Image: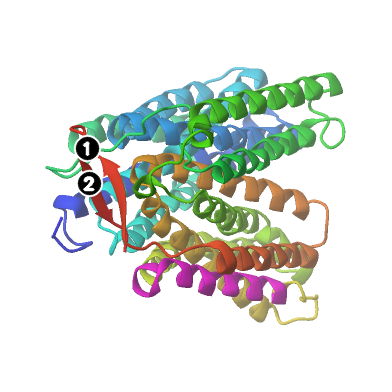
Amino acid sequence: MSEPLNLLSFSGKNRILHLTWFAFFLTFVVWLGLGPMMPFIEEALGLTDQQAKVLLILNVAMTIPARIIVGMLVDKYGPRILFSAILILGGVISIFFAWADSYEKLALLRFLSGFIGAGFVVGIRMIGEWFPARETGIAQGIYAGWGNFGSAGAAMTLPVIAAHFGGQDGWRWAFTFASLVAIVYGIFYYTAVRNTPKGSTYFKPKKTGAMEVTSPGDLALYILMNIPLYLALALLTWKLSPAKMGLIDWAAADVIYAVLAGVFLVQSWKVWHLNAHVLKAPVPELHRYKFKQVAVLDWAYLVTFGTELAVVSMLAMFYVSWFDLPKVTAALLAGVYPFLNLFARPGGGWLSDRIGRKRALIVVFAGIAASFLVLGLVDRSWPVGLVVALTILGGIFSKAGSGAVYAMVPLVKRRMTGQIAGMAGAFGNVGAVVFLTVNSMVSYDQFFLFIGAVAGIVFLLIALFLEEPAGQMAEILPDGTVELIDVK
């Protein structure tokens, strides 16, 4: 663990970092490859625009609950087996999707494929185990930033394969090839990594099924923080209903709403049941943590990652419709946005390591709010070069913000890092759903203003409620003794 972070090294913790970011990269190739492949699928199968949009919605719907579930599983079973399982199972499902012979099968398999997007959570726990607090920001930033580039990797490779191999079935072969690579790498990853460095203990939650909290106020806040996750799924259902796309009827929509309400009640009962002891006797001070830290990080990631997904989805259309840029030029300019992940997200983590977790988040959120509020003032008379520069600046701040959020996630409570990462990750998807829905209802300048306003509100939450990690967090070893882990 004393070995310094060295990206040119392939030994020790540096090796784990490289192997893990590439595992994350492959999950995004398989998961987000649907977008750039959709024109090939539409043409080959004769899908309508509505049917294509439904597949894109279904592709992200499962990811919200999956990140919560995978967070619990990784804390219990460890990242080694979880990442391998996600790569292998995700690859198998993707192959079945590639060779589906009906739209109904395509839709079902794409919905199931959404869990692949939860692979991100697994690596957060793995990197948190291998890197000390002083390096966790830059290490998490490299892991997530380079892994996120899998979406760009899919866009650059899968259409080329589809266009040159297999004719009308080219898209099927492209997905099959990517999926086989993921399966093989999943098997390799299991043989090549360990959950912890030698001599370190992998701490697991005392109970499973919900996150542990350590005070009555935190119990109430935890239950309340689950509500936005279900509202986002309800919003996706509304999009599919006769109110918007008309792909499901009102009866089906009502059934889904009822199921979501029922699952929320069951989950709330589970949370209460698992944590009811905090109402009877106080948790010893040594073992307490503040759930408000988790809540603020959730809202922060809703803004940062939600903005990232929403803006990259609309940017090319914005350049074309407001500034009459040629479609190819607009696509190339919008294509700069995903590349920012390669340095901006690690940069946010590095900044967090250098100036502190809270201060870094304050800096980047000031930048997010300012850049998007200025974009909200844009009209068609502005120089296009200035507007492009502002969108890139907003992208740098939002991606750096994602790096700063996950620089702090592993420092809240070690044995629940997966669950904390999963909840924050789910909120990122909630942000994407909310921002994309707003984008479909208002003009582009109002869309940017909305993002800036939400970022401003979260800036205040960070400034007022987030606490800088300090001292040590306590975990109990199997023999009952306490281990103190530095968080600063």
Q: In x, y percent, where is residue 41?
A: 61, 33
Residue at 81% x, 35% y is 245
Query: Which of the two residues, 487 or 374, is positioned nearer the viewer here?
Result: 487
Graded by Cα atoms within 10 Å as few (under 14), some (14 to 19) or many (20 or more), the crowding at tag 2 reads: few
Residue 265's disc is none
Q: Can residue 332 be seen in this view?
A: no
The secondary element bearing badge 2 is classed as: strand
Contact, mark 2 vs mark 1 (Cβ under 8 Å): yes
**In terms of sequence position, does the residue under pointer 2 or pointer 1 come before the other?**
1
Q: Hey, what amino acid is under mark 2?
A: Glu
- What is the total number of numbered labels drawn onto the structure image? 2
Q: Name the residue under label 1.
A: 477
Q: Name the residue under label 2.
A: 483
Tell me the chief SS of the magenta region. helix
Q: In x, y percent, where is residue 33?
A: 51, 41
Query: Which of the two residues, 326 or 104, is positioned nearer the viewer here?
Result: 104
Graded by Cα atoms within 10 Å as few (under 14), some (14 to 19) or many (20 or more), the crowding at tag 1 reads: few
Residue bounds of the magenta highlight: 352-374
Q: In this view, does 367 lie to the left or right of 165?
A: right
Q: Quadrant location of residue 6?
A: bottom left
Q: Is residue 360 magenta?
A: yes
